[in-house]
Amino acid sequence: MTRERVLTKRELNRALLARQLLSERVRTTIPRALERMAGIQAQYAPAMYIGLWSRLEDFARDDLTEALERRTVVQGTLLRSTIHLVAAGDWRPFALATRGPRHMLAARTQTHGLSEPELRAVAAALQERLVDGPLTRKQVEEVVGKGWLGWVGAYVDMVRIPPSGTWERRRADLFHAADTWVPPSGSGPELDLVEAEEHLIRRYLAGFGPASLGDIASWAGMTVGQIGPILDRISLRRFRDESGELLLDLPRAPLPPADTAVPVRFIATWDASLLVHARRTGILPEEYRPAIFNTKMPQSAPTFLVDGAVAGTWRYSAGRVVLEPFRSLPKAIMSQLAEEADRLTGFHA
């Protein structure tokens, strides 16, 4: 029996940075970048712009707004019932694969008011209204009731469309039926659940692997029991982390050396690389996690990376990016951060 290779935390860190396009900016299209990253969280619209700015060469704000208008990328409720920006070609498999988990989350979390049959009935009414065209948030709430959009949205595949959910108009207040906004491509057979689930997990491993069953389940909003049968259908490499836990990965996916040099990088709020499914990579040192995620903030704090790990937070205030390091940093590093902060200030301007 072949013994699995043990990957150090630093090797896992470098793998994550490379796959999340944080070890160097790349020259590629926005849809292709999103495919490689397995999408990007977009609850706060500017975060997806800054996330792409950190990863793509010569990225301008208008590039993403135009991609949304051209429908080559799309944003809507997907993983863990949160808003994600994905390539248009990933929307359908992501939506199909996460539909069941989204229903379960809504039924489990929504403990008062509407029953699940009532949620489904209201969702059907909303779906019927969307056939006639886009609806504003106010029009949606006339159908589902104020405060119920999040729960009903788990049962309706709809997207938020420009100009809403953009840098220029950040509020998500214009919605359309996903099948209308992102129609099926080609004339082949309709995508089935098995294919969609495999597609989703391949995207995750390409963007965040190597990973454990628990990591994959946490990101996908599924249970380990749901993930297991999907992984059984995929050809995978097997590794171990330093604690001995089994890690799975796609064949030939990049695994840079542990000593790979990486630049300073600025991370926007809600960046998925900081969530618990990537915990084993050490990108967010545990001593700093309470400062980034806590009950007093509805969203995570924007952060910056030094040598592949969070070393402080940043904020845009009074026309400039302000740095707040967690500890004293060498002058050379502060100089690099200042240069990157100046570029980010220009991006905001």
Image (spheres, rainbow, N blue to C red):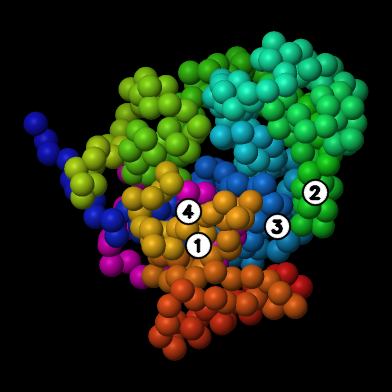
Depth check, mark 3 against mark 2: the one in front is 2
> What's the magenta region?
250-275
Task: Indicate which disc, 4 or 2, sits on the residue closer to the N terminus.
Answer: 2
Residue at 44%, 52% in the rendered image: 19
How dense is the environment of label 2, judged by Cα within 10 Å: few (below 14), some, or many (20 and up)? some
Please provide percent x and percent y for residue 139.
90, 31
Residue that mark 3 sits on = 46
**Number of marks in picture:** 4
Residue that mark 1 sits on = 291
Depth check, mark 4 against mark 3: the one in front is 4
The amino acid type of the residue labelled 3 equals Pro
**SS state under label 4:** helix
Residue at 58%, 61% in the rendered image: 301
| Residue extending farthest front | 112
Task: Check residue 254 for magenta coloring.
Answer: yes
- Asked if marks 3 and 2 touch (Cβ < 8 Å), the reply is no
Please provide percent x and percent y for residue 341.
60, 77
Q: CA distance from mark 4 to mark 2?
A: 24 Å
- Asked if marks 4 and 2 touch (Cβ < 8 Å), the reply is no
Depth check, mark 1 against mark 2: the one in front is 1
How dense is the environment of label 3, judged by Cα within 10 Å: few (below 14), some, or many (20 and up)? some
Residue 113's disc is none
**SS state under label 3:** helix
Q: Quadrant of the C terminus?
A: bottom right
Q: Quadrant of residue 14?
A: bottom left
Q: Give the camera-side residue of 145 and 51.
A: 145
Residue that mark 2 sits on = 171
